[in-house]
Image (tube, helix red, strand yellow):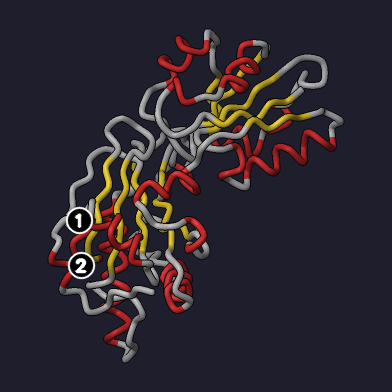
Amino acid sequence: MLYLVGLGLGDAEDITVKGLQAVRRCRRVYLEAYTSVLTVGKEALEEFYGKELILADREMVEQEADSLLKEADVCDVAFLVVGDPFGATTHSDLVLRAVKLGIPYKVIHNASIMNAVGCCGLQLYNFGETVSIVFWTDTWKPESFFDKIEKNRQNGMHTLCLLDIKVKEQSLENLIKGRKIYEPPRYMSVNQAAEQLLAIIQKRRLQGEKPEITENTICVGLARVGALDEKIASGTLQQMSTVELGAPLHSLIVTGTMHPLELEMLKLFSVDSSSFENNACQRTT
């Protein structure tokens, strides 16, 4: 049996009882290590689970999945995912590979940022399409995520923005030369995401457009959701570019039309209450 086990969002203790029981009876246990991270390291998980964990990076999961599934037809193998197992499409591919090999599988779900984001007070059914904001480079500055946020906002929907994670990435030079030298991990902050959005707004104004999102659009910054030191901040997009939320992981929400109850909840986390009172772009039902 292949078990895909969600670990939740905080630390080692966020695994479900069902998930922990599955992990403890597995012969091999892999820890997916590139779509998200917990607030504790591999060693803390090993101590709590009572099992040695094998780190599974992107290369292993996407290019060597068959080795990961080896012997799963004759013994139990677990694949641990921060959040919920299906928070990333890569894991659907793993299930399809298991089915083709005749290996039975079981999914043990857990909380993910997709539902835990409700902690800020915005209603989950008022969210539109989720987007990913990637790190820009000097030569690559995609804007497709901005168009999706605008479309959501035009429809009155909030947008959850998942922020880029760079783990075990190679520089272009090392990649070309085939050197297995990796860059230090990088995690996008709410500040960086807001700055990229602001840059797109300015660029489009210069092109004669009137962006649906402005510096005064109400946004929400979230950090380490589900952890003891979880942090939430609400305010304008401009304020999100300067707010300090500390260590990763961060997420950003761009609001759409807000119900008065949603607005009241967001005020609990306001950077500056006047940003709500004086905001001309604020939308309420």
- Residue picked out by circle 2: 276
Q: Which disc, if any, is residue 270? A: 1
Q: In which quadrant of the rendered image does the C terminus lie? A: bottom left
Give coordinates of residue 15: x percent, y percent. 52, 24
The residue located at (62%, 21%) in the rendering is 18
For residue 257, say whether it is visible: yes
In the rendered view, tell whether residue 248 sits above or below residue 254: above
> In the figure, is residue 31 to the left or right of 3?
left
Furthest residue to the front? 261
Q: Are marks 1 and 2 in contact (CB under 8 Å)?
A: yes
Give coordinates of residue 95: x percent, y percent. 73, 38
Q: Which disc, if any, is residue 149? A: none
Give coordinates of residue 119: x percent, y percent. 38, 46
Q: Quadrant of residue 116?
A: top left
| Residue at disc 2, secondary structure | helix
As rendered, which of 210 and 154 lies closer to the eye?
A: 154
The residue located at (35%, 32%) in the rendering is 227
Disc 1 residue type (three-letter): Ser
